[in-house]
Image (cartoon, grey):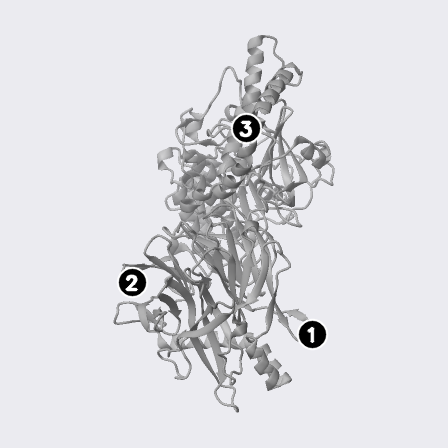
Amino acid sequence: MFLEPHHDGFLRVHPRIAHFLNLFLTTCFFVSSGAILLAQRVNGPDEAVERRKLGGDVISLNTSAEPQLIRSFIDVLSWRDDLPPSTNYAPRIYDVDASSSDGTVFYIEWNATQFSPNTTTMITQSMIKSASLTSTGQYHVSNVAGPWAAEGGRNNQNSSHLAGILVFDDNTLLVSDIGNSTLQKVDIRTGQVEAFTRTEHVPVGLSKHPTKQELFVSSYAAITRLNFDSQLKVMSMSTLAGADNEYRRGLTDADTGSEVQFNYPIIGHRSISPTGKSLYVADWMNNAIRKVDTEMGATKTIAGTPGINGSRDGPHSTALFMWPSSLALTSDGCNLFVAEWGSGRIRWLKLDNPDGDVLEVRTVAIAMWNNGSNAVPKGRTINCVTLSKDDQHIFTGAGGQIFKLTIDKSALHQCGSRAAGRDAALVVPLTVGLVAAFIVIAIAVVLWKTKRSNKCIGVFGSDSKRQESSNNIEQCTRTSSSHDAIELPTSNLPRPTPTGTGDSGRLEPILPASALASDSEAVHRYEPAPNELKRFSLPELQRATKDFSEDHLLAGKGGGYGDVYRALVMVGRELTDVAIKVMRGEFNNVKYKQINPEVTTLSQVRHRNLCKLLGFCMEQDKCILVYPFISGGSLHDRLHAVAATAGTGLAQAPYHAYDDPSEPRGLRVGSEADGVPLSWMERMSIARQVAAGLEYLHYGLEQPMLHRNVKSRNILIKGKGEYLHAYLIDFGLARPGEGVPCQQSSAADGPTPSTVAQSGTPGYIAPECRSHLRLTTTNDVYAFGVVLLELVTGQKAVMKTGADSETLLVPWARQWLVRSDLTYRQLHEIVDPLIKNTLAPWEQDMVHKLAMLGNMCTKELPEQRPSMRIVLRQVTEIIQEGPDQRYHMH
């Protein structure tokens, strides 16, 4: 057994397993130290001793990437004289924390020495040390505590391995003791060590809640929450997020902590947000940065791509990490610094809001190994990182050294209310001087606008009509905090534009491809304000599209709203591939009402399976929305056009997966899976991702949001296999809240796409909407059920049964699905012919279950349909019942 009961009531790691963990970490230590040992053997003992005096590896830092942020740096341990001459391996700094009172640096140091000159057996020891700043500006190094033995260790001369350190208060340190599965409490003044608590899992990283008496501990597969009293006595202990079984590792984002999976998560003292709502995690083996809700355990991946390591900077959607090993958050919650063990770098992550998500990733420092003649990059040297209390210094453990980097705080990224406050401070002194001029200009514009033939709502002959026109111009350009108004600038003063929205150096600027689960319980707290959208100028978009020429027009992508163009534009500081949605005709009151909900809705939602609005343009009677361009085509294209190409199934529409601006209008270009049908697991992944997006709309916002136009054409997909990413698009029909009439019309305004389409598309419209009842979230559930049936059968929502006849997919499929004793053998008749003969037995079971779920979602009575929360849970369970673990993490 790996775990065994202990007298204190907790499960403890078996001593033999603890020994192997110690051995594993020691091996890692030796690997990273091997180059130094080789250098000592080649260069001789004198040079080795000199290197030890300088702190081991003689590492330096290259900070040229961000010279405005990093002013200077020093090696805190360059003055140390406490290294014994018999040390054969340079020490390693494993974790570091800084006192909030006097700036003393406390750290864990691992040392290794040869057991004897004629053997390769090593003795390893972990100890706690401090480096305190003296009046001369140098640091004095002292031993605080340790080493001490590990229970069950075979070599009594080896100490227990210590992993994480936290300055609890001015007199107390907490240390994670791997070998003993214990959190140790260390008295800074006396060095006395006593057990704080045994832990259920092997403890690694530590973080303390800023306002509550709670402690968070990371282990190899989970984050544990401890509650303690004023006497530092642990009152309770529970798993916040991750697996109770430390051998069940992977990457799964979920709303429920028990469903989350990690693979060696690491936290630190400065990993938690100032509010205490969010715990940021370096998921080491997954090469990802995660965010955990400290109340519910809901977890989402905010940067990095699982399964792919690297050190690529750029927007969060494309940035890569190589074994992130530590992280520290600034006190305003806007900047996250990450130590990267695999590449020897310190990465700088800019967040959109306190408790928010990553906008952009940059490199601020790279560890360099001085070999005597030149500086050569040496990977696997940056072990840990923390910040001083005032955020003026970064402390990082690199090899056997601790570097103190001085930060120019004015160069730090500002976000949320701080950024708004900074801009307000710039605007207020100018407002008084500008307001009179602005009023005069506004009046002149209104008078001039009413006389132009190209008016906002047309030419009117009477004074009353002119007044209506004037009011509509004001409506087009006003700034309002109401839900029904589009947030627009009220002056020509510059406004901040978020950077990192686009994708650097490549097309398809999308949201990150790492976690596909919804974060409904926590995500709504991080919604951007509408003014974070970029306001594009009309000349800018005209240049990008060659004055909206047919060369840039996407065939078949318009609809009742207007035309869609593809182009490259600047979003922030990135050249971004975008889809530009242009409303047809003049911008009148009817179309204002049509576009306003879409802008308002899309400025609020923040979910990786909902296509993000980048910006808008409202000039010269034009209404334009700008989105990221997704290159993989729609689900409708991938399901039905492939069938038509293969000559199977019913009559299909022409296939327009996507169109390239360099090709003539309507010319099809190959998609990422050109002519290849979607596999069954890809279909399951799509079902899960779309369900997550809808579940977020229904539950993740303060007020439920209805999509009202869920269909396979409004699901875009990119990538393939376990990296396939689905996006739900087209919020033109979305309305907030439940109880909204299915049809909304006005005799004055005339018909809108909402009334023409009956709040959806034929084949996807719920029966109650066809009967003019009131709209609820169950209508979205019905439409999603139709999509599930499309995934199973490969048929369209409206099926051609003859030259002049049609039938709906739902009643057609129901002939089979209503059978209480339905088996897969019977269901086989309606399974998509493109995949039915390729399904493994366990996939056939999935097909059966998903078909039955589709039938439940499309029940005639709304009250008989499950909620999207239940639907998402059931789709997830179906996936996890299969043996393909690549899809379990999604």
Residues 352 and 718: in front is 352
Residue drawn at point x = 65 percent, y = 32 percent: 537
Residues 358 and 143: in front is 143
- State the image quarter where residue 659 is shown: top right
Q: Which residue is mark 3?
A: 432
Badge 3, how many Cα within 10 Å: few under 14, some, many 20+?
few
* Location of residue 499 in the rendering, given as x and y in whole percent from the top left corner: 59, 45
Asked whether residue 201 appears in the rendered view, the answer is no
Q: Which residue is mark 1?
A: 373
Amino acid bearing label 3 = Val
Residues 637 and 419: in front is 419
Residue drawn at point x = 62 percent, y = 46 percent: 508
Q: Which residue is mark 2?
A: 232
* Location of residue 680 in the rendering, given as x and y in whole percent from the top left corner: 52, 51
Badge 2, how many Cα within 10 Å: few under 14, some, many 20+?
few
Badge 1, how many Cα within 10 Å: few under 14, some, many 20+?
few
Counting residues from the N terminus, which is met first, the one under dot 2 or under dot 1?
A: 2
The residues bearing labels 1 and 3 have C-alpha atoms spaced at a distance of 62 Å
The residues bearing labels 3 and 2 have C-alpha atoms spaced at a distance of 55 Å
Left or right of residue 862: residue 320: right
* Location of residue 747 in the rendering, given as x and y in whole percent from the top left corner: 50, 15
The residues bearing labels 2 and 1 have C-alpha atoms spaced at a distance of 52 Å
For residue 559, above or below residue 35: above
Quarter of the figure that contains the N terminus: bottom left
